[in-house]
Amino acid sequence: MGYVHDTAMSQYIPPTLWHFVTGTFTHAAGAVAGTIAINRAAANETSVVTIPIKLVSNSAAAKGALLKSIEVDYEIFTAEPTSITWTLNKVTRGADTAVASVAAQTKTNTLSDANAKTVEQHKQTITVTTPFWLDNDEYALLQMSIVAGAGGNTTKFLAAVANFTLRF
Amino acid sequence: MGYLQDSQTTIYIPPTCAHRVTGTWSHAAGQVVDTICQSVNDANQTSKLTIPLMIFSNSNSQKGCKLKSVEIDYEITGAALEEVTAVINKVTRGADTAVAVVTTPAFTYDTGHDTAAERLAKDQHKMTLTITTPFWVDNDEYVLVELTINQAGDTGVFELLGAFANVTLRL
């Protein structure tokens, strides 16, 4: 009963929910007092950071959350990494005994590859080219692959925010 | 299109989401069987435990979530601590190349936790932080509740069970 259609919704996803593979990651204070971060220590390696996009989903078509964009706040210190690559994946869960299937989603980035890796505070926005409703057997993961290189850079991951339309 | 306002919405934030600095924190069973907690080791130290409030926000004014209070469930075992204090940090995110800005909205403790001795006592705790002027969370803002936990010279252990954000939800 009832109907809600709100196109201006956002969901904060703290860095404590993110998934970190390869590298040494620790809870640390952010550069601004009172903020939190996960710190990646300097090392010449490729780290993969995956942000689970925690949204409501719905088994009815075109209801629940329509994922439109994701903003990621992070800080790079000391030196530029070699590269940062962004991939947005939609995972369709498998039935019992079946594996999940993953489909990369077409998207655009507000920051160019060169600008996204400078020694600076960053706010990268990933815009989904064709926004999609999340079915109840689906979820989305935003992957950030950091080729650190030998420059001794460190990274602090601050926050992600998913922007979506909510329809009930 | 459409309209929903619910002034009694609560959002659970599990202890696994908490951000821990200083101390050795681990996932552990709570004192009650089948509950979960983040537990810090017994040591002479002052830890910062920050709870990120994962609530909806909205780019339109007075929509999304209006944060009114936060309840924090924790247990102190072994012995009383030296200090447990809370701060609410409201973070306004920076644009690209700009730092975030942090403000500290005023709040009051519930009557069972409005003295230091009450907050640090060996006991089960349900501490409520009531925001003096409840506020709507904009899409470029988020809220963190920071606990300072001082165990200096004690044998007490702090265990976070969970937090609950009480909001008005308007969509």
Image: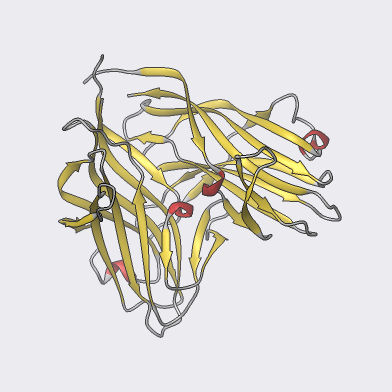
Expressed as whole percent of the image width and height from the top left, the position of residue A37 reads: 50, 58
**Residue displayed at 40% across by 44% down:** A12
- Identify the residue at the far bottom of this view: A150
Q: Residue A2, position in %: x, y?
A: 25, 15
Could you tell whether B19 is left or right of A143 in the image?
Answer: right
Q: Is A57 on the left or on the right of A80, as rendered?
A: left
Quadrant where the image shows the C terminus of chain A: top left
- Residue occupying image coordinates x 26% and y 38%: A136
Query: Residue most toward the front?
Result: A97
Outermost residue to the top: A1
Taking the spot 49% from the left edge, 49% from the top edge, the residue there is B101
Name the residue rendered at 80%, 37% in the picture.
Answer: B116
Q: Residue at the right extreme?
A: B153
Q: Is residue B52 above or below residue A22?
A: above
How many discs appear? Answer: 0
Colour option used: secondary structure
**Position of A70 compared to B87: left or right?**
left
> Dividing the image into 4 quarters, which one contains the N terminus of chain A?
top left
Looking at this view, is B122 or A34 the one in front? B122
Q: Position of residue A50 (x, y in %)?
A: 36, 60
Query: In which quadrant of the rendered view does residue A85 lie?
Result: bottom left
**B90 or B10: which is nearer to us?**
B10
A23 relative position to B121: left or right: left
Where residue A111 sits in the image (x, y, percent)? 25, 62
Instruction: Decide: is B32 above or below B19.
Output: above
Q: Nearer the viewer, residue B106 or A70?
A: A70
